[in-house]
């Protein structure tokens, strides 16, 4: 056997992430690698922090990318903010809320659960009840954009309730950032993390994160040391923090950071409000096409994310076969259901560079054609027309 260079096919990525990476971002990855303490690199890092503040809509000084995927952004927030014995209210309406609970337990914290049906937003009234019943709780954690179901929770209201009960908030914005309104400062979110590969049109592997001064006070007032050396923000800040004296902590993923920088430059060129509107516009076009195919979105309209569309699989259809055929015949990737929704839904992502007209048209046309071929009666031509009509300015 001879092993040569790896050349994957070009795919259209419309699953739950990674999403399509913009060619400008891929080109940025190929620029010369320089030292991670090189003055040029350090200047780029400062710009990157400013660009992230733009994306998160915050002035937080601690705003930077963790050198690892979104899950590490999650873990960084929990290991720094949760001390053994801390009561943490965790709202669970999908897979990622469950992971938050895991994190609390592994930090020695005591999770207090607000369980919601999958496919629904977190109910603010139920959070309020949990906080009234547990006055010792000091942290509330929830997922803003639950990628496993496509539900968007009202982050502004949830944060308001948490603050009224003297709790800090940890918000998962991995799929939210860049795809739907997120206002870290205006809403008072205390700790938030995201991912590079969802609505930022960037490659996987980095977790932008931002903490406000209240969150930093909690970390500085810890009675115990953060048990993770790599994620201890006190140490990480020695590298990312000071503009002048930076000390080696770990070797930054140099080229990956060029990619994130480029992706964020593009976000600023587009304007973040325009990016939110673009996700919504393409979501409405996709919805028009899916509904014309007779398919249903599982999340009630008012709670739907534009960037992640969970669609019921029609009765009698082998959902895995449909995905396999879309990949083989159209080089199109859509996602399977996760957890409680496994086998029941497809998850169609419209994230970042994937949220564009040709992707929506391909998806509606290809899905319709495959379903027709499997004997499902649906008017694929009419669905493509509906999609087209919804895309017209
Ligand atoms: C994708 C995702 C994560 C995990 O990010 P990875 O980069 O896969 O580690 C966490 N939370 C949500 C809501 C996500 O969509």
Image (spheres, rainbow, N blue to C red):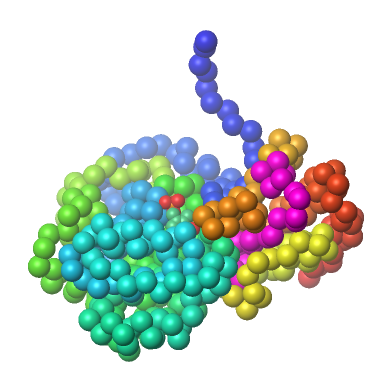
Counting from the top left corner in percent of width and height, residue 93 is at: 48, 68
The quarter holding residue 274 reads bottom right
| Image quadrant containing the C terminus | bottom right
Along the horizontal axis of the image, is 307 left or right of 194?
A: right
Q: Quadrant of ligand 1?
A: bottom left
Which residue is at 43% across, 82% downward? 126
Counting from the top left corner in percent of width and height, residue 250 is at: 24, 44
Q: Is residue 313 magenta?
A: yes
Along the horizontal axis of the image, is 318 left or right of 238?
A: right
Which residue is at 17% across, 58% downward? 226
Q: Nearer the viewer, residue 52 or 132?
A: 132
Q: Which residues are magenta?
A: 304-322
Q: Is residue 98 magenta?
A: no
Q: Nearer the viewer, residue 183 or 86?
A: 86
The quarter holding residue 374 reads top right
Counting from the top left corner in percent of width and height, residue 373 is at: 85, 43
Tell me how many marks there are.
0
* Viewer can see residue 200: no
Along the horizontal axis of the image, is 276 left or right of 37?
A: right
Which residue is at 44% across, 71% downward? 115
Which residue is at 49% across, 47% downward? 203
Residue lying furthest front: 316
């Amino acid at each position: 056997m001879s092993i040569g260079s790896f050349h994957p096919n070009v795919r259209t990525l419309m699953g739950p992430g990674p999403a399509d990476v913009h060619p400008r971002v891929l080109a940025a990855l190929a620029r010369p690698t320089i030292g991670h303490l090189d003055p040029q690199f350090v200047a780029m890092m400062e710009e990157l922090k400013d660009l992230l503040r733009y994306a998160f809509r915050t002035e937080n000084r601690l705003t930077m990318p963790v050198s690892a995927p979104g899950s590490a952004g999650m873990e960084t927030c929990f290991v720094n903010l949760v001390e053994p014995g801390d009561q943490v209210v965790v709202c669970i309406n999908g897979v990622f809320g469950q992971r938050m609970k895991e994190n609390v337990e592994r930090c020695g914290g005591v999770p207090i659960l607000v369980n919601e049906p999958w496919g629904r937003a977190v109910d603010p009234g139920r959070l309020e009840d949990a906080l009234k019943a547990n006055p010792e709780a000091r942290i509330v954690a929830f997922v803003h954009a639950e990628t496993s179901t496509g539900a968007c929770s009202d982050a502004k209201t949830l944060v308001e309730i948490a603050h009224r009960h003297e709790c800090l908030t940890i918000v998962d914005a991995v799929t939210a950032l860049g795809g739907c309104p997120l206002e870290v400062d205006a809403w008072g979110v205390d700790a938030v993390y995201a991912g590079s590969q969802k609505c930022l049109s960037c490659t996987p592997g980095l977790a932008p994160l931002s903490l406000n001064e209240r969150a930093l006070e909690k970390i500085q007032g810890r009675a115990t040391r953060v048990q993770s050396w790599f994620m201890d923000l006190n140490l990480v800040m020695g590298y990312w923090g000071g503009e002048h004296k930076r000390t080696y902590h770990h070797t930054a993923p140099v080229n990956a950071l060029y990619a994130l920088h480029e992706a964020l430059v593009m976000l600023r060129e587009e304007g973040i409000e325009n990016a939110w509107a673009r996700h919504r516009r393409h979501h409405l076009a996709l919805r028009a096409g899916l509904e014309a195919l007779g398919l249903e979105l599982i999340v009630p309209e008012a709670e739907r994310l534009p960037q992640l569309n969970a669609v019921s699989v029609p009765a009698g259809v082998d959902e895995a076969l449909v995905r396999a055929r879309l990949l083989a015949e159209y080089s199109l990737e859509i996602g399977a259901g996760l957890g409680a929704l496994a086998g029941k839904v497809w998850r169609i992502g419209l994230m970042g560079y994937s949220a564009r007209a040709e992707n929506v048209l391909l998806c509606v046309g290809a899905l319709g054609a495959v379903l027709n071929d499997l004997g499902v009666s649906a008017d694929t031509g009419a669905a493509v027309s509906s999609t087209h009509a919804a895309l017209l300015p």
